[in-house]
Image: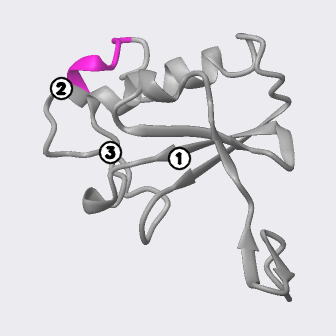
Amino acid sequence: MKDASLSKTSSGPVTKTRRQHPLALKFTFLIVEYHDRLPHVTTVMLNRPKKRNAINAQMWKEIGEAFRDVGSIGDGCRCVLLKGSGKGFCGGIDVTDQNVFAELSPSENNDD
């Protein structure tokens, strides 16, 4: 099956153009963008490829902010695609970052 993101022209394959999302500069560990051909789809990409996108405390906060703000700032978003950069989607929680566990509230840290 052919990759839908490529189209053939006389000069060779052409990839979709990506546009920077208005929230793109707000985050350190996320890349937020949308494509010209899919204006109502926003891509949020976890961006710590050297750590297999393991979620540290800062990324945890950024993910919450991104999903709260995307679609509510007049960007026309109707769908969010979450993906990871590099070889894998997400390595889970970054256990080397002690702040991750401190960020969890007592109600979220129950041993049910």
| Residue identified by numbered label 3 | 93
Q: Which residues are magenta?
A: 101-106
Residue 79 rendering spot, x and y as whole percentages = 81, 36
Q: Residues within 10 Å of mark 2 (few under 14, many from 20)?
A: few
Which label lies toward us, 3 or 1? 1
In front: 93, or 66? Answer: 66
Which label lies toward us, 2 or 1? 1
Q: Earlier in the sequence, mark 2 or mark 1?
A: 1
- Secondary structure under the numbered disc 3 in the rendered image: loop
Q: Earlier in the sequence, mark 3 or mark 1?
A: 1
Q: Earlier in the sequence, mark 3 or mark 2?
A: 3
Task: State the CA–CA distance, disc 3 to disc 1.
Answer: 16 Å
Q: Is residue 77 above or below residue 73?
A: below
- Residue type beneath disc 3: Ile
User: Are dots 3 and 1 in contact, CB under 8 Å?
Assistant: no
In front: 94, or 75? Answer: 75
Is residue 55 located in the magenta-colored stretch of the structure? Answer: no
Q: Label for residue 12?
A: none
Q: Residues within 10 Å of mark 3 (few under 14, many from 20)?
A: some
User: Are dots 2 and 1 in contact, CB under 8 Å?
Assistant: no
The residue drawn where x is 28% and y is 18% is: 103
Image colouring: one colour
Q: Label for residue 45?
A: 1
Q: In the displayed structure, does residue 28 sit left or right of residue 18?
A: left
Q: Label for residue 99?
A: 2
Q: Is residue 39 above or below residue 47?
A: above
State how many labels appear: 3
